[in-house]
Image (cartoon, rainbow, N blue to C red):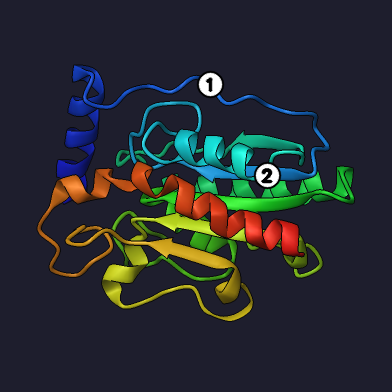
Amino acid sequence: MAKVLAATIVALAGSGGLLAAAAPALAASCANVDVVVARGTFEPGTLGIIVGDPVNAAIQKALAGTTTSAYPVNYPANLNEPASVDAGNADLVNHVTSQAAACPGQRFILVGYSQGANVVDNSIGISSNGALVGGPIVATIPSSIQPRVAAILLFGNPIRAIGKHVTGTFASRTDDFCANQDPVCQAGGLNVLAHLSYGSDANAAAAFAARLVLGG
């Protein structure tokens, strides 16, 4: 299933079926809000053209008047390296920890799509082990920084297909999108193309995150 989805993403991107968005504008290193994005498996683009780029653009509009920066989690995001999710998990936690130390007033929005959702899950202490393109937790965001994670936006989250979801500390701050019949997040789902549809949820996700940022 993962290989079929990856091949579909690559084919659509190469044929122009997915339109590449402009590279995200990076604000000052101590912007009010840092949008940290873990892209999906083999997803092209700096933040990911299916989810990361449109969601980041929508967040910028929803938080007009608030400075934002964007960080692409540095990890393979592929099927060839068994430790791909581990690398993303470690990099996300390292980035948020270092940013929190350098920018005491900065808050974070975490965004994860597909394999990237597993990266975010692990980073907040929800293991993706046993899920499609998942793995064990290797690092978690320190408890002292957790209140500064304003919102978490997940798309096509593989742990949902094995009956799991975000619980505990971050539950009320999480919006977890699963398209109907998406086989990655819905057990028994049969529509591979549903997994590529999450750009249409960008505005709803950004509105959710903006309410938490501006309300908190």
Look at 57% across and 70% down and name the residue there: 125
Q: Secondary structure at mark 2?
A: loop
Q: Residue 112: x percent and y percent?
A: 47, 50
Q: Nearer the viewer, residue 90 or 25?
A: 25
In the rendered image, residue 149, in percent from the top left (x then y), is placed at: 69, 60
The disc, 2 or 1, on the residue closer to the chain's N-terminal end is 1
Of all residues shown, which one is farthest toward the left? Answer: 190
Front residue of 162 and 59: 59
Label 1's element? loop
Instruction: Give percent across and percent down for residue 21.
Output: 43, 23
Q: What's the mark number on residue 111?
A: none
Residue 209 falls in image quadrant: bottom right
> Label 2 belongs to which residue?
63
* Mark-to-mark CA distance, 2 and 1: 19 Å
Q: Which residue is mark 1?
A: 23
Amino acid at circle 2: Leu
